Image (cartoon, rainbow, N blue to C red):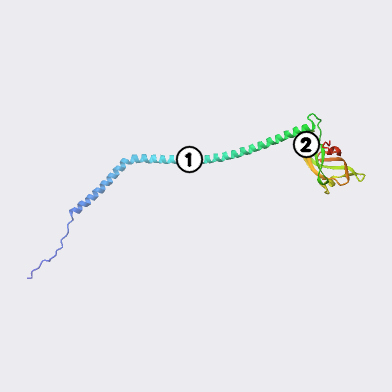
Amino acid sequence: MPVSIPPRYQIVPRRPSRRGLWMAGAVLLWAATVVGVWQLATWRAAPAMASLQKQLGQARAVLAEERARSTGLGQREATLAVSERISRSANGELQATLAERDEEIAGLRADLAFYERLVGATGQRKGLSVHQAEFLPDAGGAWQYQIMLTQSLNRGAISQGQMRFAVEGVRSGKLATIGWDDLQQKSQSPGQPYSFRYFQQLDGRVMLPAGFTPQRVKVQLAGQDAAVEQAFDWKLAIAGGGK
């Protein structure tokens, strides 16, 4: 009978290690402890967290309000700056306008004072008239003229129109008249315009032909509502007192 020889190697089932079980149990216990501690901390901290969240919300609301207020103040400051610049500019323009008006008033007062000295403050009021005509000799046979126009009948009204004059005299032993066109040496020459409230001096230069002896100056004023013709002696006119 053959003798059975036992195998050299045998398969023996491995029993679980107690150390591994202990390690697994310790891990589970640690995890459970952490969860419990977290839940306990959360439960205890829940009231404080709610309060903190509420405070955080309030702080955020206050911050937003302050930012809006800061933005509003910045816009208001910019608006005030623009308004101040506009006010300064308007004030400067107003001061300039007032200065111009003061100059105009001063000029009118000076004109009125001069006019009263010219015609006399107590003199009789007259409508549009030629107050004075003066002629001064110039080079080349020319004459410089100054003709003063006045009106005092309607004080404050504006007199407007054109002035012409002719010079009457003797030429080649005969009476002759040098008209406005000949004096200006220009055909269809327009009259000299005038526009004034109290008085105006018209200046200019004319040419008299050679061989002509002037005796009288006849001035004509043609306005919208007035037509005036006045004659002045040439000797008085060249003496500076033609009236």
Q: Amino acid at mark 2?
A: Phe
Residue 98 position by quadrant: top right
In the structure shown, which secondary structural element does the residue marked by tag 2 occupy? Answer: strand
> For the residue labelled by badge 1, is the local secondary structure a helix, a strand or a loop?
helix
- Measured as percent of width and height from the top left, residue 44 is found at 31, 40
**Farthest left residue in view:** 1
Residue at 33 percent across and 41 percent down: it is 46
Residue furthest to the top = 122
Residue 27 can be seen, yes or no: yes
Q: Residue at x 75, y 32 (%)?
A: 113
Q: Which mark is residue 121?
A: none
Q: Which residue is mark 1?
A: 70
Q: Is residue 122 left or right of residue 177?
A: left
Numbered circle sitting on residue 199? 2
Q: Position of residue 155 (x, y in %)?
A: 77, 33
- Closer mark to the observer between disc 1 and disc 2: 2
| Residue 42 image offset from top left, x and y in percent | 31, 43
If you read the primary sequence from the N terminus, does the residue marked by circle 1 or circle 2 appear first? 1
Location of the N terminus by quadrant is: bottom left
Task: Out of 115 and 71, give the one closest to the viewer.
Answer: 115
Dots 1, 2 in contact, CB < 8 A? no
